[in-house]
Amino acid sequence: HTGFTIGISLFIAVGCAYSRVYLEYHTAMQVWAGSIIGTLLGTIWYGLFETEAVRKLLISLDTTLNELERARKVMLLCLEE
């Protein structure tokens, strides 16, 4: 991730947070709490899915699903004959 991308993301997040309070849809405390919870959950999510074990698991699942799909197509072709 580049500094530019992070900067733009933070700019948009701060703008959204400001608009929620300015338009009186939420209080500043609600926006603050939401931003803290969102940051924590985002960090946990990123940490989980950037590990090598999870990456290998997802690749394994994808390979298995592709093999099942290939077998299903072969079976359908055999049934059509």
Image: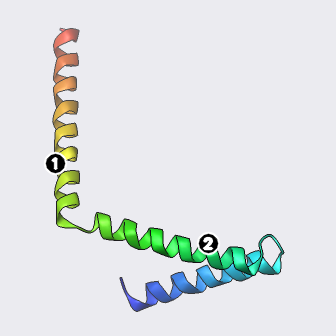
Q: Residue at 37% across / 87% down in the picture?
A: 2
- Provide the residue designation for mark 2: 34
Query: Which secondary structure lies at badge 2?
Result: helix
Q: Residue at 63% across / 75% down in the picture?
A: 33
Give amino acid for label 2.
Gly
Residue 47 percent across, percent down from the top left: 32, 70
Does the residue at mark 1 contact the one at mark 2 (Cβ under 8 Å)? no
Depth check: 50 or 9 in front? 50
The CA span between labels 1 and 2 is 35 Å
Q: Badge 1 local density, few (<14 within 10 Å), some, or many (20+)?
A: few
Mark yes or no: residue 16 visible: no
Depth check: 28 or 77 in front? 28
Residue 45 percent across, percent down from the top left: 38, 65
- Provide the residue designation for mark 1: 60
Would residue 27 appear left or right of 8 to someone viewing this image?
right
Vertical placement of residue 58 versus 16, above or below: above
Q: Nearer the viewer, mark 1 or mark 2?
A: 2
- Residue ranking furthest to the right: 24
User: Which quadrant is home to the C terminus?
Assistant: top left
Residue 24 percent across, percent down from the top left: 84, 74
Residue 8 percent across, percent down from the top left: 53, 85
Give amino acid for label 1.
Ser
